């Protein structure tokens, strides 16, 4: 498969983006968030689910939703380890990558 020259630029841009992330990460603190109990329970269920299926070649959509499911499972891990129920909500401290994954999924779903 022939690769187009712009992908060299994209790889460079991706490396610069990663460096921006390395510099910004120490400046970003975890954040205490509230979520409805049913969403917290769904996240925990995603964490507790066993995924033994073999992954074959994926298209972009399949890869995207698999990564989003993984991000939800990591939020479920956070909820199961340190979530606190308060009424119909769960309070949990999430790191910026977990928050960013949820926000990105919300923006893509619009």
Image (cartoon, grey):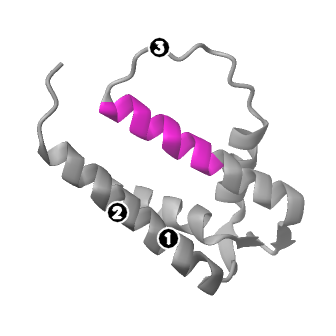
Report the quarter where the C terminus lies: bottom left
| Quarter of image, res 29 | bottom right
Quadrant containing the N terminus in the rendered view: top left
- Location of residue 99 by image quarter: bottom right
Q: CA distance from mark 3 to mark 1?
A: 30 Å
Dot 2 crowding, Cα within 10 Å, few <14, some 14–19, many 20+: few
Can you identify the residue that label 2 sits on?
A: 107
| Tags 3 and 2 touching, CB below 8 Å | no
Q: Which residue does the image show at 58% across and 64% down from the upper left?
A: 97
Label 1 Cα crowd, 10 Å radius (few <14 / some 14-19 / many 20+): few
In the figure, residue 108 lies in which quadrant? bottom left
Find residue 63 and report its horizontal and vertical position in percent: 42, 33
Which residue matches tag 3? 56
Q: Please give the label number shown on residue 102.
A: none
Residue 85 in percent (x, y) is at 84, 70
Residue stretch rendered in magenta on the structure: 60-72
Instruction: Give the residue at x 69% y 78%.
Output: 30
Mark 1 or mark 2: whose residue is earlier in sequence: 1
Q: Residue at x 40, y 16 (%)?
A: 57
Q: Of marks 3 and 1, which one's residue comes earlier in the chain?
A: 1
* Nearest to N terminus: mark 3 or mark 2: 3
Q: How many numbered discs?
A: 3
* Gap in angstroms between the C-alphas marked 1 and 2: 20 Å
Q: Which residue is mark 1?
A: 21
Residue at 12 percent across and 42 percent down: it is: 5
Judged by depth in the image, the label closer to the viewer, 1 or 2, is 1
Q: Is residue 35 visible?
A: yes
Nearest the viewer among 94 and 39 is 94
Instruction: Give the CA distance from mark 3 to mark 2.
Output: 27 Å
Report x, y in % for residue 10. 24, 52
Label 3: state its secondary structure: loop
């Amino acid at each position: 498969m022939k690769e187009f020259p712009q992908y060299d630029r994209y790889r460079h841009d991706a490396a610069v983006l990663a460096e921006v992330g390395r510099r910004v990460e120490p400046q970003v603190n975890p954040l205490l968030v509230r979520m409805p109990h049913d969403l917290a329970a769904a996240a925990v269920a995603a964490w507790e689910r066993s995924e033994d299926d073999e992954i074959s070649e994926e298209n972009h959509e399949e890869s995207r939703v698999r990564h989003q499911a993984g991000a939800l499972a990591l939020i479920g891990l956070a909820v199961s380890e340190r979530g606190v129920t308060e009424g119909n909500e769960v309070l949990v401290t999430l790191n910026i990558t977990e928050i960013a994954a949820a926000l990105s999924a919300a923006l893509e779903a619009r």
